[in-house]
Image: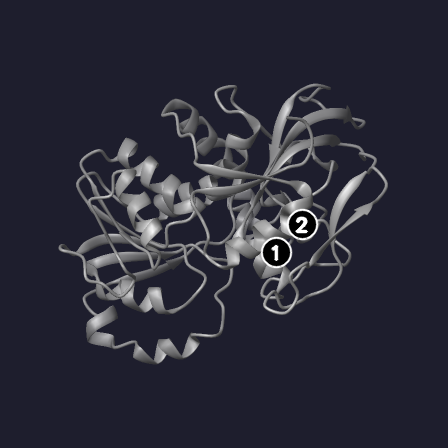
Amino acid sequence: MKALLLDRITDLTQNKSPLRLADIPVPVPKAGEVLIKVSVCGVCHTELDEIEGRTPPAFFPIVLGHQAVGEVVQPGENVQHLKTGDRVGVAWIFSACGTCRYCREGHENLCESFRATGRDAHGGYAEYMTVQEDFTHRIPPVFNDAEAAPLLCAGAIGYRSLRLSNLRNEDNLGLTGFGASAHLVLKMTRHKFPDSKVFVFARSEKERHFALELGAVWAGDTTDTPPEKLDAIIDTTPVWKPVVEALRCLRSGGRLVVNAIRKEDFDKDYLLHLDYPTHLWLEKEIKSVANVERRDVQEFLLLAAEIPILPEYEEYPLEEANRALLELKAGKIRGAKVLRVSGA
């Protein structure tokens, strides 16, 4: 089968083609697994973190990609609920142990044996992939494959971030960065909290205009001061400066939710700007987001179908994944990026 492989950690400023196209064997599903023919796979900033070593893959060569949508073509032994022809998606959570304290309490995202799709197991930048039946997600019919792909990560992690923000109707929400996840959070917020106002911080003027098009009441640069203090802010950037700047804009008792697996190091000295009375005093909180639970993906897909949320996306053929990744790193974003793996 056709697949894109990452052979090693590399610097994208030096290597413009980190993924190579290869022909590898079609995987065989084990007991409890299904073989999926991948139709599309979303492109995520986490792939940049994997390629550049901030969250390194477990082995090489590896197939990246954790927003895969496709069709079950072969159920393995003991598969109970899926059959050939079912349309499913695979998200960041590839598996967890199922028996530890965190798994028993429904917090499998914190499991020490948590495995991520495309980092700890082969992902969706390939024509076929296998996954445990219990870690697949049925795709509601309201979405086509390319619309569904960004929902599996950008949408699900955005949903989790919004839950962790403790936002209430009429609260002011800030979004720092306005890529795939944030634009879906804005749509969710307008549906779930119709009397809340959304303020967007983004470096790109295009992103700021896009946010206003989608219903933000204000959009400014990451260093700008909004006209009102904010009850909660969700940070979706890969760097530190927006975190410090966001804390300045919180109300007393406000919460900053940092939605990032890793932060890049080039601006970590900006943390020296952290001033306790300005940024943290008066019971402000910082909450990190760690992965997603299956519950997040399942609940968000149902919510997105109900609204419905139809993400903005740009589609690329699989062979142009390197271009999509470089554009993502350069901040050339409007909504989400999706690779067409097979089909039309």
In the image, farthest residue toward the right: 25
* x and y, in percent, of residue 239 in the image: 43, 66
Name the residue that disc number 1 marks: 112
Task: Residue at the far left: name it.
Answer: 227
Quadrant of the rendering where the C terminus is positioned: top right
Q: Kindly state the secondary structure of the residue where label 1 is placed.
A: loop
Residues at circles 1 and 2 in contact by the CB criterion of under 8 Å: no
Q: Nearer the viewer, residue 253 or 43?
A: 43
Q: Which residue is mark 2?
A: 64
Q: Which x, y percent locates residue 266?
A: 47, 74
Left or right of 62? Residue 45 is left
Residue 135: image location, x then y, percent:
63, 36
Could you tell me which residue is drawn at 68 percent across and 59 percent down? 18
- Pick the front one: 319 or 158: 319
Residue 89, compared with residue 96, is above or below; it is: above
Locate the N terminus by quadrant.
Answer: top right
Neighbours of disc 1 within 10 Å: few (<14), some (14-19), many (20+): few
Residue situated in front as seen by the camera: 300 or 308: 308
For discs 1 and 2, the disc positioned in front in the rendered view: 2
Q: Residue at x 31, y 54 (%)?
A: 205
Residue at 73% from the left image edge and 19% from the top image edge = 84
Circle 2 SS class: loop
Label 1 or label 2, whichever comes before in sequence order: 2
The reply to whether residue 174 is in sight is yes
Three-letter code for the amino acid on which mark 2 is drawn: Leu
